[in-house]
Image (cartoon, grey):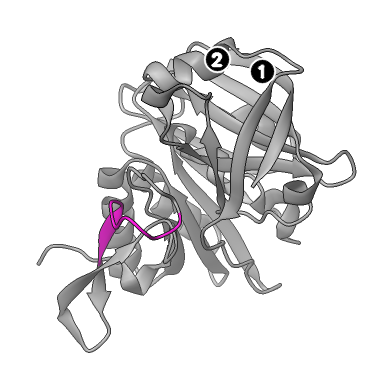
Amino acid sequence: MAQAIIQENSILHGDYRKIVFAVPEMANTAKAGQFVHVRIDERLDHMLRRPFSIHDTDPAKGTLTVVYKIVGAGTHILAEKTPGECCDLLGPLGTTFTPCADDVVPVAVAGGYGSAATFLLTRECKQKVVLLIGARTQSELVLDDAYRACGCDVRVATDDGSCGVKGRVTALIAPLLAENPGKKFFFYGCGPLPMLLALAKTLRELGLDGELSMDEIMCCGVGACFGCVVKVNDPASPQKWHYERSCVDGPVFPLEKIYLEH
């Protein structure tokens, strides 16, 4: 836990914001896939922390960056904070994405600002990252330009066809495989739950491997309250499942643990 000084709190576009915290101890240890639990302010009606995926870090500057969308009272208050103010941060928390082997192509599959959670892979992976990003419409796309600036191969799908391929983000997988026969891929996913379940189903049908960030609404963030449980496969039987906590057992889960309704 640390008092983090806000260095920047800027507009990306629309309701999307980027906030940069000066918090050296976390900047030096955070990994792709982890999150921070933020205390917005000291008011009793805001006593519960808000979890945010760690978008980026700069250990040399001691900064940690979060990308968020204004969706409720907490994020409205966060958006009004200015440089020099402090937030109480707990973290880095949760499991991490696993950097893939040198002969494997890393592919991040993101829905909306789920791309925030996979961005650190561009620094942790030695190989060029492929980003498959989907959104309802072009105005809902976020961070695709940041990935391009890092040299990533960015491919876009929108439900309405306003940018890239018209359709779901999973429609981008087959063309990628067809263009790269013989190559090995490892997939990293983050986004809305329906997208992640569709992604898990597609990857399994194609015999591919990966890890997905299964975020749930969190209360304590440290495994005590069991408010953020997700269904995962029971290793003893593929037809059975049990609950695990996304805050400490996840949020990143290997593909084989993702439970799909039979």
Residue visible at 37% across and 53% down? 214
Residue 9 is tagged as 1
Decide which of 51, 207 is in the foreground and name it. 51
Mark 1 closeness class: few <14, some 14–19, many ≥20 residues within 10 Å: many
Q: Residue 16: image x %, image y %? A: 52, 19
User: Could you tell me if residue 46 is visible in this image?
Assistant: yes
> Magenta stretch mostly in which secondary structure?
loop
Q: Which x, y percent locates residue 154?
A: 59, 39
Question: Magenta segment: does it hold 103?
Answer: no
**52 up-or-down from 6: above or below:** below
Q: Nearer the viewer, residue 167 or 23?
A: 23
Query: Residue 220's spot in the image, x, y percent?
Result: 40, 48
Q: Is residue 184 left or right of residue 216?
A: right
Query: Up-down: is 229 above or below 219?
Result: below
Quadrant of the rendered structure where residue 103 is?
bottom right
Q: Are marks 1 and 2 in contact (CB under 8 Å)?
A: yes
Disc 1, SS: strand
Q: Amino acid at mark 1?
A: Asn
